[in-house]
Amino acid sequence: MITGERGPQPEFPASEEVYRRFQAEHFVQNVLSNIGLPFPRTSFNRQSLSEPEDVLWHDQEDRRFEGWGVFAVTAAQTRMCLPTGDGRTLNFDLEHNPLPLNYSHTELKCIDVDAQEEVKRPSNKVRKEYRVELSRAASKQIIINPQV
Amino acid sequence: MREIILQARERSMYLSNQDRFIAALNELQKTAGLQYGWDSYGAEAPTPASASIAKHILSILQQSNMPPSKVAASAEGGVGICFVEGEKYADIEIFNDGEMLATTYRGDSEARIWDLESDDASITEAIKQIRAHLSA
């Protein structure tokens, strides 16, 4: 969906889902491994502005990812608050960040609660904690199974 | 007679595990050909160093006769070695920066994540803990 002159819609209801594609290599015995999920600035398509299968299309090119799977998580499931171990607390949330050819494009971001600044790259361990929890939620909402 | 059957079963399990290690090594080999952006979202390809550490961990797993369920490139840059037994999950993730983390969880219970040192003793201990988790 072309963005055109439209701006982002910052509100995310807790029940709104976001979609992301994944490869069969990361789907192990019906479990989506966190190994296939990156953080930060993880890309999704938001439910209110797209269909699940839309995420199988490349954002910038006329190319479809054949055989890949699609999972969904709700905005509520992406919202987490994790301690860093050095006294800081990080809030994880979604940000609607439209691309020219994908108005539904959304990214995960991470904010230092005290400093109110975005943290570009938390430690491997904090990112892992987040990725593990997100993959566990995603494993329960596989919308399209990948072709093995 | 019973002993012969048990021996045959053990041998069959050993051969099955050997097949799984061959598959795991092939999966690791596949990660070596990946380029930047292999996940379509801009993931780094595994470095030769992280792949080499993964290969070493696979050799320790083979000595322990404990084949992984999957070896795959990590979307964070690096290699992941995954184990799944029903609702029990574990992995060892080797990042391109050399850091390693081990993870275990079961169903909806709290996940356990811990740092691994690069020495064999630390890796062997993590494998022992993962085996205990999967067989509990």
Image: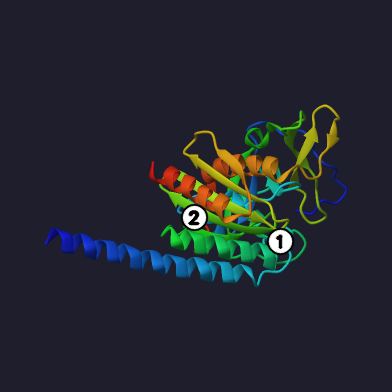
Where residue B92 appears, as percent x and y from the top left, is 57, 52
Q: Is residue B46 left or right of residue B87?
A: right
Q: How many marks?
A: 2
Where residue A146 appears, as percent x and y from the top left, is 53, 59
For the point 69% across and 40% down, which residue is it? A126
Looking at the rendered image, the disc whose residue lies closer to the viewer, 1 or 2, is: 2
Q: Is residue B54 left or right of residue B129?
A: right
Q: Chain of mark 2?
A: A
User: Do circles 1 and 2 both sit on a common chain?
Assistant: yes
Q: Give the residue number, with chain letter if any, for mark 1.
A: A58
Q: Callout 1, which amino acid? A: His
SS under mark 2 = strand
Measured in 3D between alpha carbons, the distance from the residue under mark 1 to the one under mark 2, in whole angstroms, is 24 Å
Q: Earlier in the sequence, mark 1 or mark 2?
A: 2
Q: Give the residue number, with chain letter if any, for mark 2.
A: A28
Which corner quadrant of the image does residue A125 belong to?
top right
For the point 80% across and 48% down, which residue is it? A98
